[in-house]
Amino acid sequence: MFEELQEHLRQTFDRLRGRGKLTPDDIKKALREVRIALLDADVHFAVARDFVARLEPRLMGQDVLDSLTPGQTVLHHVQEELQDLLGSETQHMRLGGPAPHVVLLLGLQGAGKTTLAAKLALRLKQEQHWPLLVACDLKRPAAIEQLAVLGERIGVPVMRPDSDDPAKVARAGVERARAAGQDIVLVDTAGRQQVDPELMDELRAIKAAVAPQVSLLVLDAMTGQAAMETAKTFSDEIGIDGIALAKLDGDARGGAALSVRAATGKPILYASVGERPEQLEPFHPDRMAQRILGMGDVLGLIERVQKQVSEQKAGEMQGRLKKGEVTLDDLMEQLKSVRKMGSLRELLGMIPGVSRKVRESDVDESQVGKNLAILQSMTRQERRDPRLLDASRRRRIAKGSGTSVADVNRLLRQYEEMRRMAKAMRGMRGRMPQLPPIERR
Amino acid sequence: MAIWDKWRKGLERTRQALKARLEDLGGKGASREEMLDAVEEALITADCGVAIAREVRATLARRPQDDIPAGFREELGRLAGAATDLHFAAQGPTVWLLVGVNGAGKTTTAGKLAALYGRAQGRRVVLAAADTYRAAATEQLAIWAERAGAELVAGRERQDPASVAFQAIEQAGARGADLVIVDTAGRLHNRQGLLDELGKIGRAVARAQEGAPHEVLLVVDGATGQNALAQAQGFLGAVPITGICVTKLDGAAKGGALLAVRRALDLPVKLVGLGEGIEDLVPFDPAAYVEGMAPNFRSAEQ
């Protein structure tokens, strides 16, 4: 989609090239493209309209009109404006006053409150807090059980309700935490299908009973136009201090983030990015801005890669690559780190827009495993000096790895290509070459 | 009549919002451009997406100004498509498979389907708890089984969900049950590993009973935006989706994204959740949907 917007903007401006200067009318056309991109990303209609209105004077500036690449300059402004709206920097939850601090989790059914409660508890525990989870969702069948199981998994105590009044349960939770010396109480509340008066009454009562430091609204990142009204109602009727976006590991563009910011003015504090309890991250407005524009969470991707490839190894390898001395051992390391990063398709799935096409055709997951098996069936000597690999050794390797000689040959061809690339890079500024393209079956 | 009221009630907020925007469509000095703008806005705020909104706008732009409100209803009706029934097996137990992203409402829908199509219609129902991943998912379904008077077949935690589904269908056959509803774990449609697992469940179901699954229902949260299409495409890559169940369609949500899904993939909406009660899960009625979304203002104001 980012590419689409980029392309549209390019076309809009290209037509004008040769005619010299851009006119305000041209800028209006560009603004229209921006608006459509925002709507496609699920930004609320009114928010998109206001956004474009605010953007307009910026785009009328000389830098755009004079730019040789007006499309890029417009994109730059769009991204900056988005980032401003989303909050200029990553914000953290503020827990002031005397302990125990109470954090209230609010949201509609299926937004992901219970899962998020456990994730937040784990995160706080890792930050040397001692949290207590309180199950106040007395409505959904087995919600209490779910929280209890999650609490056990992450090693955080869970208080089961001892009353059918959620406000009383929450109150008792705070008392229990105080008595035990626990410093944070996380209250998981019930959701409803929609914001209804019954739910609002229930939440108001809980809030009055425990005076939370932070009321956190949990919102599904896949939400469409309704995000605006939902957030506004929770904010107006209960009062919220921050927002957590759930299911951001999907490929939704997440324009709802912009809508809820506009509706409440409150910061987005957390992004939930997977099913496992540790998959909760601080929210990065800059990355979200890119994501809404469809540029993908490139930084997030790089971070994940960095986590897996130890810097030293990467450094060593880069040194050898610079000299043009790449071995099959290096290739094996590369494939192993690709494996460690998780499924290639899942990684590519973090990039909205481009992801589907790639997922469907271009990446052959099994090839990584196959190549790795081939490499592991070689002796260390063979990996260091592939010239040793004569026909009989290749047959042995094929047999040992459960592949065919043709597979072995194909891998060796890829290796040759990689070596040539490394050689070609000699003298150039050292950057790690990309893995040679994995051949499709 | 009761069902009609339910639709009206369920979509009341949507209707009011649309009404406010389209109030002047009957005339009162609104310009043609303003009317078309109102139509476009109404469709976009209903999550139909820019593509549909522009298409409808272009179509209506060709009609006389007086025809725009009626044309709007026609277009909505065209996009909503025809009503389609749920399929039952000619012989042996019917098997319905529920799939969808996390939090869409699969388990609740499984429970409500068991109540609506089970005892109330004289069928014996088996609920298969093939969500062996989410904590307490089986307990949740067990409570629904009790409410609906259905039997529960559950696996162990982390048991291969395909084998749970297979066992459930086998047992249902042995016990003479009429309907097996298989609840699966929520999964995002860009997680290939989890989609592969779902494909395996689908194949296990097909192996367990000829002609099964008779329905593969994609459960989609009615508040979902443009991602609904990606969801449908992702799941279609794993299992043969036969229809869509839109949950939580009351309230602020309008479910317009499902019109986009229907148009792009020709997947019919089969069921709609208009409230929290068991009886609020109803077969999709396109005429009622259009009525709920865009009533005939002029006649309504008489």
Image (cartoon, coloured by chain):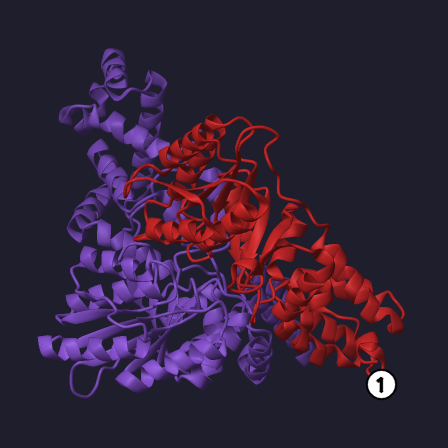
Chain colours: A purple, B red
Relative depth, front residue between A407 and B41 = B41
Q: Is residue A349 left or right of residue A281?
A: right
If the image is split into quadrants, where does the N terminus of chain A sit? bottom right
Mark 1 neighbour class, 10 Å CA radius: few under 14, some 14 to 19, many 20 or more:
few
Q: Residue at x 30, y 45 (%)?
A: A342
Relative depth, front residue between A99 and B192 = A99
Q: Residue furthest top?
A: A392
Residue annotated with mark 1: B29
Location of residue A346 in the rendering, given as x and y in whole percent from the top left corner: 38, 47
Q: Residue at x 73, y 71 (%)?
A: B39
Location of residue A49 in the rendering, given as x and y in whole percent from the top left corner: 60, 78
Q: Residue at x 29, y 58 (%)?
A: A146
Count of numbered circles in the view: 1
Image position of A342 with respect to A420: above or below: below
Image position of A233 with respect to A292: above or below: below
Picture quarter containing residue A297? bottom left
If the image is split into quadrants, where does the C terminus of chain A sit? top left
- Three-letter code, disc 1: Gly
Q: Is residue A335 left or right of residue A34?
A: left
Location of residue A65 in the rendering, given as x and y in whole percent from the top left corner: 59, 78
